[in-house]
């Protein structure tokens, strides 16, 4: 009975502890935003369905650098043209420590973060203008850890597109929902060796 109670206590302590081990130097984050709402600033808003795969390496505690790909379909309203957004670029994340800047983490089960990205991308509009150019985004997010290594994420992001084509500049604010998997370097190396 003592072993059962001790085991339950250890599991509970691990479950309710602050998320630290996932975002330490040397770990990897792999994930994707899956769906998002688009609040158009100089264009119509709507819902997007797509993938934004991202991978980043923690160069030091709370700081991750990596890359991302953007593949989204956007429909701004009934009867409106369908848009396809694409892009590839660099990604950076900074996770806020508990108590930093007066921010406490929700239920000590996750972390607030800021994400920024920059790269090349564009928009292709059905029967309309298309553009390719410099794309960037920045915004706050929250990763809620449902297990020690898996986080469900919400991210509000300002996105800009400085086009070289028919549309000189386009911007919007999106609310993205997705997930991330946090892997210690030793675990990531083992997975890579199994794939070979």
Image (cartoon, grey):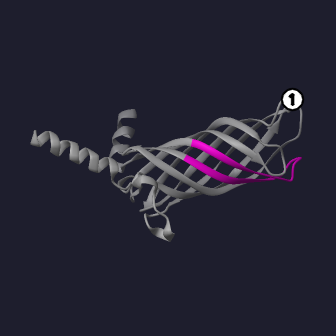
Residue at the top extreme of this rendering: 79
- The verdict on residue 95 being magenta is no
Q: Count of labels shown?
A: 1
Residue at the left extreme of this rendering: 2
Q: Residue at x 53, y 58 (%)?
A: 113
According to the image, label 1 marks what residue? 79
SS under mark 1: loop
Rendered view: 162 above or below 132? below
Picture coordinates of residue 102 (x, y %)?
A: 49, 69
Whether residue 71 can be seen here:
yes
- What kind of secondary structure does the magenta stretch mostly adopt? strand
Rendered view: 86 above or below 61? above
Q: Residue at x 84, y 46 (%)?
A: 43
Nearest the viewer among 188 and 157 is 157
Instruction: Write down the quadrant of residue 75 in the picture.
Output: top right
Q: Indicate the quadrant containing the C terminus: top left, top right, bottom left or bottom right.
A: top left
Q: Residue at x 37, y 38 (%)?
A: 191
- The verdict on residue 175 being magenta is yes
Nearest the viewer among 30 and 88 is 30
- Residue range in magenta is 154-177
Q: Indicate the quadrant containing the N terminus: top left, top right, bottom left or bottom right.
A: top left
Picture coordinates of residue 182 (x, y %)?
A: 42, 47
Nearest the viewer among 13 and 96 is 13
Picture coordinates of residue 64 (x, y %)?
A: 49, 57
Picture coordinates of residue 179 (x, y %)?
A: 51, 41
Query: Crowdedness of circle 1 by 10 Å Cα count: few (<14), some, many (20+)?
Result: few
Q: Is residue 19 left or right of residue 176?
A: left
Whether residue 196 can be seen here:
no
């Amino acid at each position: 009975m003592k072993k059962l109670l001790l085991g339950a206590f250890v599991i509970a302590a691990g479950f309710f502890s602050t998320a630290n081990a996932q975002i330490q130097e040397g770990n990897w984050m792999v994930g994707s935003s899956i769906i998002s709402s688009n609040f158009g600033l100089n264009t119509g808003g709507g819902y997007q369905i797509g993938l934004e795969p991202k991978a980043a390496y923690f160069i030091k505690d709370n700081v991750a650098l990596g890359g991302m790909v953007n593949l989204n379909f956007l429909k701004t309203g009934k009867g409106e043209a369908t848009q396809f957004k694409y892009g590839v670029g660099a990604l950076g994340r900074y996770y806020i420590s508990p108590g930093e800047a007066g921010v406490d983490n929700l239920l000590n089960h996750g972390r607030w973060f800021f994400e920024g990205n920059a790269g090349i991308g564009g928009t292709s509009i059905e029967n309309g203008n298309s553009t390719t150019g410099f794309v960037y985004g920045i915004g706050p997010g929250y990763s809620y850890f449902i297990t020690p290594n898996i986080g469900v994420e919400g991210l509000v992001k300002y996105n800009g597109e400085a086009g070289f084509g028919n549309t000189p500049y386009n911007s919007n604010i999106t609310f993205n929902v997705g997930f991330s998997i946090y892997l210690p370097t030793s675990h990531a190396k083992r997975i890579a060796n199994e794939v070979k």
